[in-house]
Amino acid sequence: MIVNCRPMPLAGLRRHVSSCPLPQPVRVPPLHRVCRRSPKAESGVVTVQSGNGTTRPFYYRDPVPWPTAEEIPLQPHDLSTHPYVDLIVAGAGPSGVAVAERVAQAGFSVCVVDPNPLSVWPNNYGVWVDEFEAMGLQDCLEVIWSSAKVWLDNDTHGAKFLKRPYGRVDRPKLKRKLLQKCAANGVTFLDGKVDSVSHGSGSSTVKLTDGRTIGGSLVLDATGHVRKLVEFEKKFDPGYQGAYGIIAEVESHPFDVDTMLFMDWRDNHTEGLPDMKKRNEDLPTFLYAMPFSPTKIFLEETSLVSRPAVGFEDLKERLDARLKWLGIKVKKIEEEEYCLIPMGGVLPKHPQRVLGIGGTAGMVHPSTGFMMSRMLGAAPGVADAIIDQLSRPADKASQSGVARRPGSEQEAQAMAEAVWQATWPVARLRQRAFNTFGMDMLLTLNLFQMREFFASFFSLSEFHWHGFLSTRLSFTQLIGFGLALFMNASNSARMNLLKCGIPGLITMLIDIAPTLGNYYPNAKTVKQLKMEQDAKAAALQSQKQLQAVNAGSK
């Protein structure tokens, strides 16, 4: 739902949490003045007249084509000459290639293993514009809506406007940008599917399904929700965000083109359908819509979170009923999407020898489903930690020589632990525990309680609701967020929060207890290793000098 950097089809709050600044006003090019957007959209920033007579900026451009092998000649990996690399990346999704190109740029050998690195990224992604701006990726947005809208019910005051620009990611352009960096920095690609990984004597060996193997100092699992190589110590039992969506050409639709529909919890479409009405009251779903023009729109019926997941046939049936109620007649379906995203659940064992990022590492926002901005925001930190661990301690970078290759399992485990510390620092672990507590709360809410919850949520300060959706709030700030939400809620909503929240609160406190100690005892940066080496060398030199003095005095 609260879709944001979420695979768009998964309307779910997704977003980025790295340590980027709070949202800043969106900067757009000078506006061209037009009265109303024509059905045949032209690329550019335009001014759209809304139903209330006001005008707002709306940006649209046609998406670019997907990259091809002719356009981006990716370097194939030759196992006969290079059986071993510094970093093996399993999976060529956004987060995997983002880490790969950054590590390769630092001068290390990186191989990405994927059956088809130029394949289409199937899911659409919606993001808050300020998140992509903070990462310098605003050029990878093909549509920008100046605001978003939430419908809670059909009451006169049932609609809320969110003054925060929202965008649709240009997937081909983002992929092209990342793959071009991979090609320029010397990343190699090995066509195939990873099957398993083994470790010994400080090295890791990844086996492909066809029997081939490749060795490496470090291995990064970026296979998404498949989680092919990472290990789990406990049963993985997440909530699920399910969505069925279509990009369609329609005769018309009732939505302002300059405003994206973030959530529509109205249930008028279930009138006369008692079975659907009951299902929707027990396991509510909402409409998420991205209008591209008066006759082209993305429409998605989304279950924010449930356990087990709401079935796709049920979601499709609800969407069909909703479109009929809204008077939307579909002329042509251009894309059809089925989306299922695991939310919350236990994290992979950490630290462990295999590294992780993205869905593999549990980076999906447990309460919202947002993940694209979160993954891309985490990639530089994870990559820099890998670079640090692959670097040899030296007085100057020019003296570091070849990449550091772990000589023992103990050394390799310590290197991996340092990277996991950057992937899931203690502050992020506490933040995730709170957000998982939020997911557990949402799992208990019916339609009417869900409406009350979001009425309170979107009445909070922008600092709180922006920060929560973008995972920018620290644990103490999240406590303040929770208290503000409670105080802002109606009396009935407060009672429900108390009834359902206390058990989850106890679980959250148990989850964060280990973070109060030395969570990563063996994690050391290359700087710390160098200081240890220098200290040992100084101690040895002092000992030799003392021995020389003693020998001379005899």
Image (tube, rainbow, N blue to C red):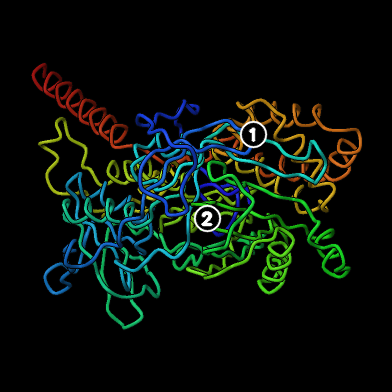
Q: Is residue 62 left or right of residue 87?
A: right
Residue 547 position by quadrant: top left
19 or 208: nearer the eye?
A: 19
Residue 204 position by quadrant: bottom left
- Amino acid carrying label 2: it is Met
Q: Nearer the viewer, mark 1 or mark 2?
A: 1
Q: Which residue is mark 2?
A: 8
Q: Which residue is the extreme one toward the left?
A: 552
- Amino acid carrying label 1: it is Asn
Q: Secondary structure at mark 1?
A: loop
Q: Percent x, y for residue 533?
A: 24, 34
Q: Which residue is mark 1?
A: 52
Q: Is residue 70 left or right of residue 489?
A: left
Q: Which circle's residue, 1 or 2, is located before the other in the chain?
A: 2
- Quote the CA–CA distance across marks 1 and 2: 28 Å
Residue 244 position by quadrant: bottom right
Residue under the image location 84 percent in, 60 percent down: 282
- Is any atom of residue 238 visible in this view? no
Q: Considering the image in quadrants, where does the C terminus appear?
A: top left
Placement of 430 over or under 263, stated as above or below: above
Q: Percent x, y for residue 39?
A: 47, 53
